[in-house]
Image (spheres, rainbow, N blue to C red):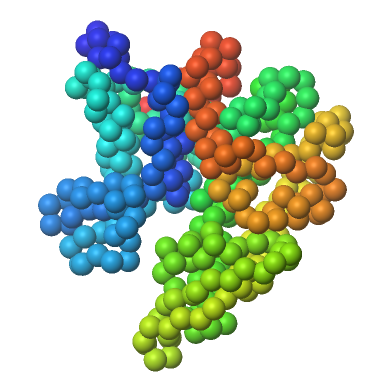
Amino acid sequence: MIRNFFKKFSKDMGVDLGTANTLVYVKDQGIVINEPSVVAINNRNDKILAVGEDAKIMMGKTPAHITVTRPLIDGVISDFEVSEKMLKHFIEKVHRESFAFMPRPRIVIAIPLDVTEVERKAVEDAVMGAGASEVLIIEEPMAAAIGAGLPVQEASGNMIVDIGGGTSEIAVISLGGIVSWKSLKLAGDKFDEAIIQYARDKFNILLGERSAEKIKIQVASVVPLDKPIETIMRGRDLLTGLPKEIIITDANIREAIIKPVRLIIDNIKATIENTPPELVSDLYQRGMVLSGGGALLRGLDKYIAAETKMPVHITDEPLTTVVRGTGKILDDIENLRELILPSTKDMGFG
């Protein structure tokens, strides 16, 4: 009864709880939060010092008593308590200007395809513990397909490739369900790791995570560019221990990340091979849609199109596709409820 009373003053939310970023959609308002999934904790009293962008700025720069952590690894919760606190922070931030002093919103949240029941229950429990009145869970590629405007409930093949921070989700969707799929723990973070390893092997430079990510955004490409681009790589010289900087080009970074890119393409091909022929015929005409931050890699769409002999389209604003999908579900819950996964409680967990 009390929960229902507070629910009246709460704002229903759609959440993309990503390894790299958490995005929040509020009904009738659109996307109101887009912040890194990073939390800074004071180890002396276990209090949260900062969440999101404020915490990310601290990465690699903290004294011993402050830990900066990412509570999600490969798309799943690795630190339950910190994830719950982070979600609670975002819920309170959304309701800060409203009259809800104990917000109880209904929350639609997207999760990767290959999570276990235990991992799914951890997400439900974290969201409920953060203050939700109801948790509706949807698979990430389904949310991405809805966000990209694909007709997922029709009897036709729709292919989505969502390359996020921790996972890449590849799925063929028809009649409101996923027909064939692959879920890889291989995405933006692995590109950053490949750049760090390349800098170490090729130039004897030790790079930080944020520096590698910045270089990826500035110059990464998977096909040769008409006009080469370059940037400065700064880090610690592994031989002298002193600061070092060099100029690198898109060709260097292409060499660094091509292996994980090839693995993603191999899995796209495997997903198509496992798809019924009638749906493959649809895909050949319609092509596939790329979403997520990885879709912004220069030339990735052309590279995948050349390898698969299929049209490849990048959705508008690929970074927000999943959360926009959760928002569309909130806005049309009656027609789209069949796409929601059953609660783990209904399945006999907890």
Front residue of 111/39: it is: 39
Among the 4 quarters of the image, the one containing residue 62: bottom left
Q: Which corner quadrant holds the C terminus?
A: top left
Q: Position of residue 340 (x, y in %)?
A: 54, 22
Is there any visible trace of residue 77 in the rendered image? no
Q: Which residue is pictured at 43% across the width and 83% down the height?
A: 244
Q: Residue at x 26, y 53 (%)?
A: 40
Q: Residue furthest left?
A: 45
Q: Position of residue 153 (x, y in %)?
A: 68, 20
Q: Residue furthest front?
A: 227
Q: Is residue 293 above or below residue 239?
A: above
Vertical relation: 243 (above or below) 350: below
Q: Residue at x 62, y 68 (%)?
A: 229
Rendered-image quadrant of the N terminus: top left
**Residue situated in front as seen by the camera: 211 or 284:** 211
Residue 313 horizontal side relative to residue 162, left or right: right
> Residue 198 is drawn in which quadrant?
bottom right
Residue 245 on image: x %, y % = 46, 81
Residue 44 visible? The answer is yes
Q: Please say if 230 is above or below 186.
A: below
Residue 93 placement, left or right of 233:
left
Q: From the viewer's side, name the closer residue of 128 and 98.
A: 98
- Whether residue 301 sits left or right of residue 194 in the image: it is right
Q: Position of residue 224 (x, y in %)?
A: 73, 66
* Number of callouts: 0
Which residue shows up at 78% across the image and 38% down it?
287
